[in-house]
Image (cartoon, rainbow, N blue to C red):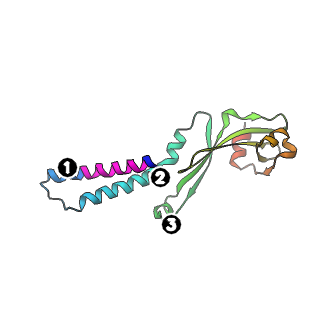
Amino acid sequence: MFMELIASFVAGFAAAGVVLVINMVTGNRLPKWVMPVAAGVTMIGFAIWSEYSWAGRTKAALPEGVEVIDTVEVSRFWKPWTYVVPQTTRIMAADVAAIRENDSVQGARLVDLYLFERWQAPGKVMELVRCDDPARALATEAALADPEEAAKWLPVTRADPIYGAVCTD
């Protein structure tokens, strides 16, 4: 976040510099208010670009074998433009290249899920997914030791993004 704030200030100073050069070339004919307005508009534009491009930059940085399976788009009243084009603020990705079978439960697979949220540190969780009888459970030590008894299975539909990423061969 701090680096984006610095980048915003640099963009504002650069815009002010461009206006300064244009003003010098035109013989100081521009009004005095043009420079701060250009800097402010550039800083706001950079902030909006940064917010909207975060999801694409995050997806592009994912390693091979990790696929985005779900995104969350939101609109906020203090960002009225998000009502026109909602902003992606969260991403869930699955490491489909490293899906493992769980020998304790027939038809269950173990998958690493990566959770990304704007302005938050990434998170990683391991989940058990049953493909025969669609359900998922958090892969705790107890759940891995005895998945049938200790796991808290939550039913999912076949349309669920986790099911689709883990159970389609």
SS at mark 3 in the image: loop
* Dot 3 or dot 1, earlier in sequence: 1
146 horizontally vs 9: left or right: right
Residue bearing mark 2: 51
* Label 2 close to label 3 by CB (< 8 Å): no
34 horizontally vs 168: left or right: left
SS at mark 2 in the image: helix
Name the amino acid, label 2. Answer: Glu
Classify 10 Å Cα crowding around label 1: few (below 14), some (14-19), many (20 and above).
few
SS at mark 1 in the image: helix
* Dot 2 or dot 1, earlier in sequence: 1
Residue bearing mark 3: 77
What residue sits 75% from the left and 48% below the top?
Answer: 158
161 horizontally vs 14: left or right: right
168 horizontally vs 145: left or right: left
Which numbered circle lies on residue 155?
none
* Label 2 close to label 1 by CB (< 8 Å): no
* Dot 2 or dot 3, earlier in sequence: 2
Residue bearing mark 1: 21
Residue 98 placement (x, y as % from top left): 69, 33
Judged from this view, the residue extending furthest toward the front is 2
Residue 90 placement (x, y as % from top left): 58, 51
* Label 3 close to label 1 by CB (< 8 Å): no
Name the amino acid, label 1. Answer: Val
Spatial CA span between label 3 and label 1 = 38 Å
Q: Which residues are magenta?
A: 4-17
Who is closer to the viewer here, 80 or 146? 146
For residue 159: magenta?
no
Residue 155 placement (x, y as % from top left): 79, 52
Question: Up-down: is 145 above or below 16?
Answer: above
